[in-house]
Amino acid sequence: MIAIVDVCSGNLRSVEKAVAAAGGAATVTRDGDVVRKADKVIVPGQGAFGAFTRGLAERDLEAPLREAIARGTPYLGICLGLQVLFDESEEQGPQRGLGLVAGRVVRFRPADHALKVPHMGWNQVRRVAADPVGDAVADGAHLYFVHSYHVVPADPAVTVMTSEHGVVFAAAIRRDNVFAVQFHPEKSQRTGLALLEAFVRT
């Protein structure tokens, strides 16, 4: 069973439908015990970093998530589900993250004013490291992004995909059983579905 963690995000049902299309049995939940017992965990996220971390605290989901990750449960983070793994975000902040991956979340500040913030729409990704889930996405594929902030890992070796919007940024990271992406696989058509299929299988 795959637990899709409900942290006040608007894309839960689209993620649930995409996982089902990828062959996974998923349930949307805000129950910490379900998260603890899940075979795999997906944390989608849209909105502001601070509201997301408050949602984790108010729904008593931080401890179950930490326990699941520490136990080795495969984790897929999407958008804020990626950013929350890091030490802190400068969005409305600094705001404290989970501190499971060293680094920060910073705002795009493109020197080219023709580049809009938020970074929104289809953009190309580059694979920079092999990964059992990330390898489902071809080098140079286009995926769908919506974000104003991006992660800056303290250890560049955790980055498995990059993209570019004024700066080259981490589009996907891997640390042990944790895999997380800045783009939205549930909005990325066949390419996103291939990534979700790989997560369901591994």
Image (cartoon, rainbow, N blue to C red):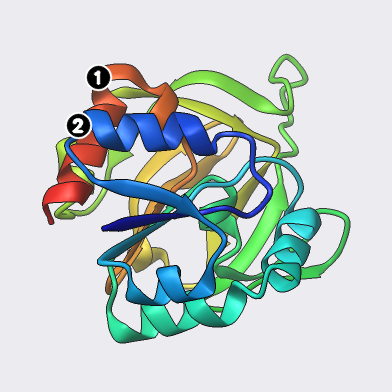
Tell me which residue sits at (79%, 59%) in the image. Answer: 50
Tell me which residue sits at (40%, 42%) in the image. Answer: 162
Residue underneath mark 1: 190
Q: What residue type is labelled 1?
A: Arg
Q: Within the image, what quadrant is residue 87 found in?
A: bottom right
Q: Which amino acid does label 2 sit on?
A: Ala
Q: Where is residue 144 in the image (x, y as percent from the top left)?
A: 46, 24
Q: Which quadrant holds the C terminus?
A: bottom left
Depth check: 108 or 87 in front? 87
Depth check: 136 or 11 in front? 11
Residue 47 falls left or right of residue 136:
right
- The numbered mark at residue 2 is none
Depth check: 6 or 192 in front? 6
* Callout 2: SS: helix
Q: Is residue 137 visible?
A: no
| Above-or-below relation of 44 to 176 | above
| Above-or-below relation of 117 to 92 | above
Q: Position of residue 171 (x, y in %)?
A: 44, 44
Q: Which quadrant holds the N terminus?
A: bottom left
Tell me which residue sits at (24%, 46%) in the image. Answer: 25
- The numbered mark at residue 194 is 2
Residue 141 falls left or right of residue 79:
left
Q: Can residue 147 be seen in this view?
A: yes
Q: Where is residue 125 in the image (x, y as percent from the top left)?
A: 35, 32
- Do callouts 1 and 2 mark residues in contact (Cβ within 8 Å)? yes
